[in-house]
Structures are given as C-alpha cells and as structure tokens.
C-alpha cells in the first residue's frame, strides 16, 4: 500500500514537471514524443501512443508511439467506428480495459501491422476548447491492472497535452501558411504586371507573344508550387503512410533513368545508370523513393551544363542501400549547402537558370527520413554536385499485412 502511495506521489510530481515543459514546446514532433514517454512513465505502462483526430476527414491516425517502429505506424488510419480510440472520440470518455482482445471495439489491424500485442489498455480523449484533438492511450500495465490514480493522472496529463498540441499545431500551420503566401506573392506580382502590359496598346505582336509565354510559365510554376506544398504539408504533419514493399533497386534506377531521358536530351545531357548485379532488394515505399530519385534527377538535369552528364549509381553494405546521383553541373556555393533542404530555399546564383519551387529537396528529405534514412550532398562550383541517399535495407518490424511475400 505504502509503495503504491509513493509511486502515485512520484507520478503526480512527474505530471507537474512535464506540464511545465509541454507549455514551452512548440515543435509538434518533440512535444508528442515527450507526452507519450511521460504517459507510459507515470502509469507504469509498457507503451503509449497518440492518435490525432482530423475532424474534416472524420478520421483518426497514429502520430507517435513509444517502442514501436515509427515509419510503419505514422499516418496509419484507425476507423472511427469499430475501434476503441474511435469510441473515445465519439463518446468523449475514457476507457479502461483489462483484456483488449475480449473487447468488441478493439481494432486489431493496427496490432497486426506494427507487430505489437495489446493486453490491458487505458485511453483518454484529448479535448481542448470543447474540441477533440486526439486520443492518448497507454498499453499493457507492467504489473497488475490500470488503477483509478492511473486514470486520473493520465487525464491531468491529457488536459495539458491537448492545449499544447493545439498551440503547436496552430504555430506550425501559421508558419507554413505564412511562408506559402510569401512565395505566392512573386508569381502573382509578375502575372499582374504581365496582364497590365498586355493591355498597353503600344505592345508589338512579338512582345505580346513573349508576355503570354511568361504568363504560361508562371501558371505552371504556381501549379507545381501548390502540389509540392500540399505534398510537403502532408509529409510534415505525418499524414502520409509509407506503403512498404520489397523491390529491386536496380530496376527502379533503370526505370527512373528512362523516365528522365527525353528531358535530358533537350539539353544534350547524358544519363548513365551504373548498378552492380548483386544489388539487394530494398524494403521501402517504392513510389515515394521513385519520387525522390526523379526529383534529384530533374535537378541534376536543370542545373547541369549543355552536353553534361549524370551518373546514377547504387551500392550496398549489409545494412544499407546507397544511391548516388552525380552531375557535371554548375555546382552549389559552399555557403548555400547548409540551407539546401530548407523549405523554399533556392540558390541565388541559380536564379534565372531554371524554374523551381525550392520545395523539392525538403520533400526528398522528409521521405528519406521517414524511412529512417539519410540524404547528403557534396558539391564543387563549376565541377558538379552529388546527392547521396542511404536507406536501411529493412525496418525493424515487418508489417504483416503489407504486400511483402
Ligand atoms: P527547385 O524547385 O528550386 O529545384 P529544390 O528544393 O529541388 O528546388 O532545390 C533547391 C535549390 O538547390 C535549387 O533551387 C538549386 O539552386 C539547388 N540545387 C538542387 N539540386 C542541384 C544540383 N544538382 N546542382 C546544383 N544546384 C542544385
């Protein structure tokens, strides 16, 4: 009994301490990570997870969890009907269960995907300003069953967490939207100037054609800015779930080389793919890795010189597959290199050389990091640039319900 009381006191102190930290964290990922760790700690549970609620799509999706493979979990959708978390959102009440498998609301697909077995469960709704923002769950009490004090402490933590999540989300959104709006101003200003000029009677036929051409290019750029922005916003918010399969890296590299050949020929750039015969299979989201490679290849063409070349090569170690895309292009100034993966960053010296959004490399980085990999760059002005991506050959946990044989 005395032991329980000391544990409870410790836990309350921990809740007070974490509440203070939560209030000062605006980085959503870090914040959610802190919350799940604290939740598992104070209730002495094996694991904890947070599902966020998207009230437009009326869907719940996994955001973070302790002890579970993140890229597999992130973005995993849990139906509102037929799940305990969904029941918590709809009824705005907490749930305490000793054996989840005996509960008809239990949604076992997640368990199958992440390979984690749930026995006991305690879940609470995260509510702020009368709005449900998500669900906090702790799984498998290490000793005995979840108790009343566990539930009340998790509720106190949940109330703090909900406010902090809402603040961090608002901050994140306003930041991203402010940047996007800022980026829209330049093309909009040039469209507005172009239409003004078109209306001037002294413009020659040739000048008009040139202006119409500019308008066309600016609209194409705005379009690609909008799609890339949406892509990045989804990746950053964790709403993208990677669909992993096992596939041949060599085939993918040849395929990407083929796709980009005609674009490369426009400036007489040669693409060579060089992959050893024994390149192993990779377990990853093929479409997303293809998106990264096409993006890097497109840059290698755009920032190359006429008659230049590109070498795409693959390599591997027992734990990693590495892909390098090396070009003989204009190169990147040393002081720009640390900023390359920042949103909307474009090298000033390259302005006018090629059109772009400055979002491509941020998207590549999000995808590669979402696979627990790394992306690196080496460059020399006037000589060329080389981007390398390194991906783990397989993740810790093999999703059972994916298409892996
Ligand atoms: P963009 O749409 O502008 O190409 P990215 O995010 O893909 O956006 O790239 C950011 C910037 O990095 C580019 O504007 C360009 O200045 C520079 N860059 C990217 N790849 C290369 C490359 N292969 N060679 C030289 N510069 C590059």
Image (tube, rainbow, N blue to C red):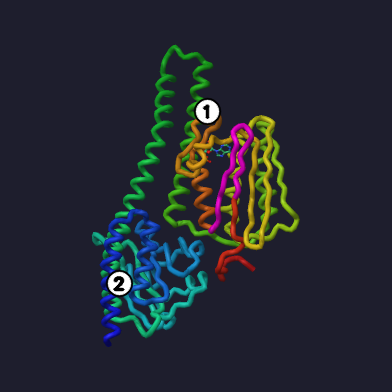
Tag 2 residue: 154
Left or right of 183: which side holds 71? Answer: right
Where is residue 389? Give x, y as percent: 59, 51
Give the residue at mark 1.
Answer: 352
Q: Residue at x 33, y 54 (%)?
A: 26
Question: Does 379 appear in magenta?
Answer: yes
x and y percentages locating residue 278 in the rendered image = 74, 58
Which residue is at 30% across, 77% downward? 150
Position in image of residue 244 (x %, y %): 57, 61
Which disc is residue 193 wearing? none
In this picture, residue 303 sits left or right of residue 45 = right
The image shows residue 88 at horizontal and vertical percentages of 33, 71
Question: In the orientation shown, which residue stands out farthest toward the right?
Answer: 277
Alpha carbons under labels 2 and 1: distance apart: 56 Å
Say left or right for 282 vs 353: right
Dot 1: what SS? loop
Residue 288 versus residue 267 in the image, above or below: below
Q: Quadrant of the N terminus?
A: bottom left
Secondary structure state at the residue bearing disc 2: helix
Q: Which residues are magenta?
A: 372-388
Q: Is residue 163 found left or right of 248 in the rendered image?
A: left
Residue 270, relative to residue 294: is it above or below?
A: above
Instruction: Name the quarter showing ligand 1.
Output: top right
Residue at the bottom extreme of this rendering: 1
Q: In the image, is residue 386 part of the stretch drawn in magenta? A: yes
What is the quadrant of residue 315 in the picture?
A: bottom right
User: Which quadrant would residue 399 be assigned to in this image?
Assistant: bottom right
């Amino acid at each position: 009994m005395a032991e329980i009381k000391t544990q409870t006191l410790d836990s309350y102190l921990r809740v007070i301490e974490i509440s203070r930290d939560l209030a000062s964290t605006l980085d959503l990922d870090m914040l959610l990570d802190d919350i799940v760790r604290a939740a598992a700690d104070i209730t002495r549970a094996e694991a904890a997870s947070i599902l966020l609620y998207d009230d437009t799509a009326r869907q719940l999706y996994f955001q973070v969890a302790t002890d579970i493979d993140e890229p597999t979990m992130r973005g995993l959708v849990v139906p509102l009907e037929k799940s305990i978390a969904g029941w918590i959102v709809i009824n705005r009440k907490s749930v305490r269960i000793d054996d989840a498998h005996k509960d008809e609301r239990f949604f076992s697909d997640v368990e199958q995907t992440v390979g984690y077995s749930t026995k006991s469960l305690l879940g609470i709704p995260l509510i702020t300003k009368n709005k449900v923002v998500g669900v906090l769950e702790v799984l498998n009490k290490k000793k005995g069953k979840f108790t009343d004090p566990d539930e009340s402490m998790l509720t106190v933590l949940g109330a703090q967490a909900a406010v902090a999540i809402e603040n961090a989300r608002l901050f994140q959104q306003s930041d991203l939207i402010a940047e996007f709006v800022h980026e829209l101003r330049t093309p909009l200003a040039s469209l507005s100037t172009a239409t003004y000029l078109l209306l001037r009677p002294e413009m020659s036929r040739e000048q008009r054609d040139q202006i119409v051409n500019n308008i066309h290019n600016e609209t194409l750029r705005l379009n690609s800015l909008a799609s890339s922005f949406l892509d990045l916003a989804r990746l950053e918010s964790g709403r993208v779930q990677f669909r992993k399969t096992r596939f041949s890296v060599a085939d993918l590299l040849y395929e990407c080389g083929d796709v980009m050949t005609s674009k490369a020929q426009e400036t007489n750039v040669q693409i060579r793919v060089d992959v050893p015969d024994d390149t192993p299979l990779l377990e990853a989201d093929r479409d997303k890795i293809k998106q990264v490679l096409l993006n890097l290849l497109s840059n290698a063409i755009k920032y190359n010189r006429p008659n230049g070349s590109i070498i795409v090569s693959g390599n591997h170690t027992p734990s990693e597959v590495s892909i390098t895309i090396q070009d003989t292009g204009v190169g990147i100034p040393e002081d720009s290199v640390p900023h390359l993966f920042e949103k909307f960053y474009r090298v000033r010296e390259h302005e006018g050389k090629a059109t772009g959004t400055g979002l491509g490399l941020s998207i590549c980085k999000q995808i590669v990091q979402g696979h627990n990999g790394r992306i690196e760059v080496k460059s020399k002005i006037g000589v060329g640039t080389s981007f390398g991506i390194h991906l783990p050959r397989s993740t810790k946990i093999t999703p059972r319900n994916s298409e892996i044989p």
